[in-house]
Image: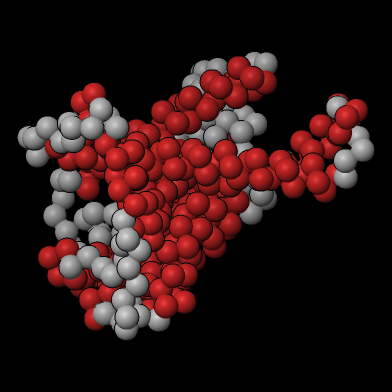
Amino acid sequence: MVEALAISLVKAAPALGAAPLWAVTLLLMLASAGIILVFALTFEGVGSLVLRKVAGDIQARIGPNRVGPNGILQFLADGVKLVLKEDIIPAQADRFLFQLAPYFVFVGSFAAFVVVPFGVGLIAADLNIGIYYVMAITSLVVVGVLLAGWSSNNKWALLGGMRAAAQIVSYEIPVGMALLPAVLIAGSLSLQDIVRSQGGLLGIFGWNLFHNPFSFFSFFLYFTAAQAETNQTPFDLPEAESELVSGYNVEYSGIRFGLFFLAEFGDMFIVAALSTACFLGGWQVPFFNAAALPAVWGNLLSLGVFLAKAFTMVLVMMWVRWTLPRLRVDQLMRMSWKYMVPLTFVNLLGVSLWLLVFRGKGIPAMIASLFG
């Protein structure tokens, strides 16, 4: 998409005609990365404030209320504090790997934003292997947390890193198989194609969530497994404070600790964005074709709809985080291998049979054809 935009700019602007196409493409790629980075950092900062406010409401307390009106600038104060804190590297740590680990975790989270379809034309890279890309790039987190745990030369950090690696690998399988029904229904691995396949006159009933009973079940399987894969409470065993002090990041401070913190909120948004794109219609507006509007208004409308859906899912994750108690390690592993993996496999088989028997039609489409 970026290359196509670069070609259009070169043709439309004579002043750019003398510039090499690769230079224009590179500038657009850097601009896209900058916009995504600003959005990610803004979301992660505001998300930390909302998380504290939600926690305060659930626990019958006020939450942050000192910095700015009603505490709304607390996330800026936290960011400044992390940047100004001393970056301490333990004497016994492997210095190079200790410094490298947070960047693996942050890049694994941030790079996934590239294929998120924020609107009709708002996507940095519409890859034809979008789902596979997200699964592959987020697996860098495993490398990062293992490096952080091992290089710290701390038993609690090492145990937290090993727990995180085992947990992420265990839940990668049900997450992938829970997303495949959306791929089968759309006939494409591109997230933008998956969103487009959920449009039409059926409104919300055109979403994959309501396509068939198995896709409805897939949504809940994915949402549960994804929270476990991203170490969200009640599945935050790698950093269980009561057992491991803080887990794999126990020796980190300053900006490097902040990178782990930012990656956590980035993962939260990616889970919400994939839920929205694959099951909740993405940027599609019920009973309205946003793509028919002029480009600017269509993109703004679809962006607002997508963010509203994604932020709703983020709020649900926060609500779950402060409501349910933490599982034990054995319970977490048992839930993955004994229940989630078989259920997602059977569910995938059910979706495949449904599409084969009913020739790709969903329940809403069949009902509409009866009255049509």
**Near-viewer residue (311 or 281):** 311
| Residue 158, above or below 83 | below
Percent of width and height locating residue 179: 48, 52
**Can the viewer see residue 271?**
no
How many numbered dots are placed on residues in this image? 0
Please indicate whether residue 128 sits to the left or right of residue 215 in the image: right
Q: Residue 125, image x and y in percent?
A: 66, 45
Give above or below for 22 relative to 106: above
Task: Say whether residue 109 is left or right of residue 49.
Answer: right
- Residue 169 locus on image (x, y percent): 40, 70
Quarter of image, res 168: bottom left
Identify the image's colour scheme: rainbow, by chain, secondary structure or one colour.
Answer: secondary structure
Residue drawn at x 25%, y 59% is: 235
In the rendered image of this protein, does residue 83 appear above or below residue 328? above
For the N terminus, give its image quadrant: top right
Residue ID at (38%, 43%): 44
**Residue at image coords 54%, 34%:** 118
Q: Where 273 sits versus 97, above or below?
A: above
Left or right position of 34 against 246: right
Which residue occupies 15% across, 70% down?
243
Quadrant (top left/top right/bottom left/bottom right) for the C terminus: top right
Q: Quick check: can you spot residue 231?
A: yes
Where is residue 245 drawn, in percent x and y? 18, 68
Foreground of the two, 26 or 146: 26
User: Which one is nearer the viewer's eye here, 59 or 169?
Assistant: 59
